[in-house]
Amino acid sequence: MQGSIGHNKADDVEAYREMLARFKADADTVTEITEANAQFVRDHVGYGGKLAKEIDATRDDKKRPHLEAGRQIDGAYKPLIEECDKIIKGLKQKLAAFLDAREREAKRIAEEARRKLEEAERLAAKAAEEPEEDPFLAATAPTVDVKAAHVEAKIAEGQALAASRVSSAAGGFAATSLKTKRSAKVTHYATLIAHYAGRNEMKELALKLANADIRHAKGEDIEIPGVEIVEERVL
C-alpha cells in the first residue's frame, strides 16, 4: 500500500498519472478484506483522498490566474453589456406602450368602421325591400354607399393589423411588433405539483427534498409521506 504523499506537490500531470497508476495497482491487489489487511485498506482509502485533494489543489493553483484574468475581463465588459441591456429594456418598454396604444386606437377605429358597414348594409337592404313611394322623400333620402363603407372598413382593418408593427427607419433591422407572451401564474401550488407529479424532473426534486429532510433529522425518527427510510452502513 502507498504511504504518505509527502510535502512536495507534483506539478506535472504525468507525475500524477504515475502516482494514480500505482494507487490503482495497489487497490487492485485487494481481493477481499480480512482482519490482516483492513487497516491497510483504510490507510489506502485515506491516501486516495489525500491524493485527490492534492491533484485538485494543483488544478486550482494552475487555473486561478486564468480565472482571475477572466474575472478582470468580465469586470471591464459586463457592466457595459448590462448598461446596454438596461437602455434597450427601457426603450422597448416605451416602444411597447406606444404600439399598444396605437393598436388599441386602430382597433377602435376598425370596430367603428365595421359597425358603419353593418349599418349601411342594413339600410341598403331595407331600402331595397321597402322602397320609398313618395318621390320627394325618395329624392331627399340620404344616400347609402355600401361600397364606400366596405372600402373604409377594409382599410381600417388593415391598419389595425399593422398598428402593432414598426419597421426600421434605416432599413438595417427587421421590423418588430408586439406579440402575446403567455406565462403561468400559480393559483394553487398543490394542484400544480400534482399535475406534474409524473414528470422525472419532479420526481428527482421530490427525492432531493426527502433526502435533505432525512439528513436534517440527524438520525432522529422522521416520517415523509410516500417514502420508506432506508438505512445502510457506509464509510
Image (spheres, rainbow, N blue to C red):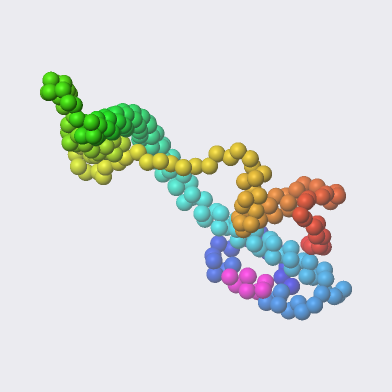
The percent position of residue 200, horizontal first and vertical second, equals: 62, 58
* Residue 24 to residue 229: above or below: below
The image quadrant where one finds the C terminus is bottom right
> Does residue 212 appear to the left or right of 123 in the view shown?
right
Identify which residue is drawn at 79% across, 70% down: 40
Q: Depth check: give the residue in front, 70 or 50.
A: 70
The image quarter in which residue 77 lies: top left
Identify which residue is drawn at 63% across, 74% down: 21
Q: Can residue 165 be seen in this view?
A: no
Q: Is residue 131 visible?
A: yes
Return the residue found at the far right: 35
Q: Main secondary structure of the magenta part?
A: helix
* Residue 143 to residue 190: above or below: above
* Residue 2 to residue 67: above or below: below
Identify which residue is drawn at 30% across, 31% down: 115
Count of labels in the image: 0
The image quadrant where one finds the N terminus is bottom right
Region in magenta = 17-24
The percent position of residue 175, horizontal first and vertical second, equals: 26, 42
> Does residue 139 appear to the left or right of 173 in the view shown?
left
Q: Depth check: give the residue in front, 19 or 77.
A: 77
The image quarter in which residue 156 lies: top left
The percent position of residue 49, horizontal first and vertical second, equals: 69, 62
Magenta stretch contains residue 189: no
> Does residue 1 appear to the left or right of 85 in the view shown?
right
Identify which residue is drawn at 58% across, 70% down: 17
Q: Depth check: give the residue in front, 99 or 26.
A: 99
* Residue 142 to residue 178: above or below: above
Return the residue found at the far front: 133
Magenta stretch contains residue 21: yes
